[in-house]
Image (cartoon, grey):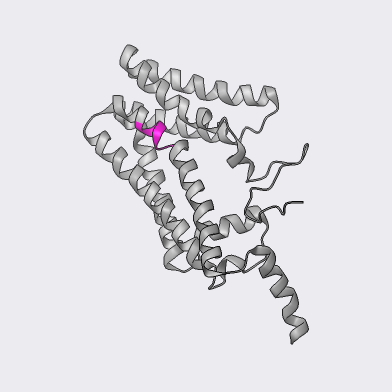
C-alpha cells in the first residue's frame, strides 16, 4: 500500500467538526469571497453607487443564508459578508466606488507585514499555521534543518499580499473602479491557490534536496532522544 505523504492535506471524516484545513478544500470559496465585488462593480456601472452597495450586500447575505440552508460550513461566506459590509460602508462614506476596495488594501498590507515580521523573528508564519493544521510534532517547523523552507514559503505570502496592496492602491488612486473587480478576482482565490501550491511543492522539494526529516521522521527522532540519554 502506498504511504500517504505527511504533507498531504488531512482528509475530513464525515460528520467531523469544522477544521481550519476545510477552508482549503472549499471549492466555493472563490464565489463566497469574490462575487460581491464583481456585482458591486457591475451594478455601480449600470445603476450607481447606492444600488451597487445594496446589491453587494444582498449577494453577501444570500451566499451566507444559502450555506446555512445546506448546512455547509459558513466560514468563508461569513468572512465575505463582514468584508463586504465594511467595504460598502467605506464606499458610501467616501462617495466613490473605489472606496469599496480600500479595506482590501489595508487588510493585505497588514497580512504582508505580519508574515514579514514572522520571518524576521525566525518564526515563519507558514510553519506555525501548518504545524497546527496538520498536527505536526511541536518544534518541527522551528528545526534549523526545516525552518528555511518555511521561511521562503512565508515570503511567498509577503509577495502576494504586497502585490495585492500595491495594485489595488494604484487602481484606486487612478479611479479605475471598473478594473478593480476583475483584478480582485484574479488576485483573490486563484492567486491564493497558486501560492498554496507553491508552498506545498517548495517545502517538499527543499526537504528532499537537503535530506531534512519529514514530520514522521522528526517525531521518531524526538521519541528516540530520551532513550539515548
Residue closest to the far front: 1
Residue nearer the viewer, 203 or 17: 203
Quarter of the image where one finds residue 78: top right
- Quadrant where the C terminus lies? bottom right
Q: Secondary structure of the magenta portion, mostly?
A: helix
Quarter of the image where one finds residue 167: top left
Residue 111 drawn above or below residue 167: below
Residue 83 drawn above or below residue 122: above
Residue 188, image x, y percentages? 43, 37
Residue occupying the point 55% across, 64% down: 208
Task: Residue 185: say if magenta.
Answer: yes
Answer with left or right where residue 16 lies relative to residue 58: right
Residue 193 drawn above or below residue 58: below
Magenta span covers which residues? 183-188
Residue 203, image x, y percentages? 52, 58
Residue nearer the viewer, 61 or 185: 185
Residue occupying the point 65% across, 63% down: 215
Residue occupying the point 50% across, 61% down: 150
Instruction: Answer whether residue 95 is visible to the viewer in this image.
Output: no
Residue 46, image x, y percentages? 33, 12
Residue 145 drawn above or below residue 30: below
Amino acid at each position: 500500500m502506498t504511504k500517504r505523504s505527511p504533507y498531504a492535506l488531512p482528509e475530513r471524516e464525515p460528520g467531523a467538526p469544522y477544521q481550519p484545513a476545510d477552508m482549503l478544500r472549499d471549492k466555493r470559496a472563490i464565489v463566497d469571497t469574490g462575487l460581491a465585488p464583481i456585482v458591486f462593480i457591475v451594478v455601480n456601472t449600470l445603476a450607481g453607487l447606492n444600488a451597487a452597495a445594496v446589491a453587494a450586500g444582498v449577494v453577501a447575505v444570500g451566499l451566507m443564508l444559502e450555506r446555512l440552508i445546506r448546512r455547509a460550513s459558513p466560514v468563508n461566506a461569513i468572512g465575505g459578508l463582514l468584508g463586504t459590509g465594511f467595504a460598502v460602508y467605506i464606499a458610501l462614506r467616501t462617495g466613490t466606488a473605489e472606496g469599496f476596495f480600500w479595506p482590501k488594501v489595508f487588510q493585505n498590507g497588514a497580512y504582508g507585514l505580519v508574515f514579514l515580521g514572522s520571518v524576521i523573528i525566525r518564526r515563519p508564519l507558514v510553519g506555525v499555521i501548518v504545524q497546527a493544521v496538520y498536527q505536526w510534532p511541536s518544534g518541527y517547523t522551528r528545526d534549523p534543518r526545516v525552518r528555511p523552507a518555511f521561511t521562503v514559503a512565508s515570503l511567498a505570502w509577503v509577495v502576494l499580499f504586497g502585490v495585492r496592496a500595491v495594485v489595488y492602491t494604484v487602481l484606486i488612486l487612478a479611479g479605475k473602479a471598473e478594473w478593480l473587480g476583475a483584478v480582485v478576482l484574479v488576485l483573490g482565490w486563484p492567486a491564493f491557490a497558486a501560492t498554496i501550491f507553491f508552498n506545498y511543492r517548495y517545502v517538499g522539494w527543499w526537504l528532499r534536496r537537503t535530506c531534512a526529516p519529514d514530520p514522521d521522521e522528526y517525531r521518531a527522532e524526538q521519541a528516540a532522544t530520551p532513550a539515548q540519554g
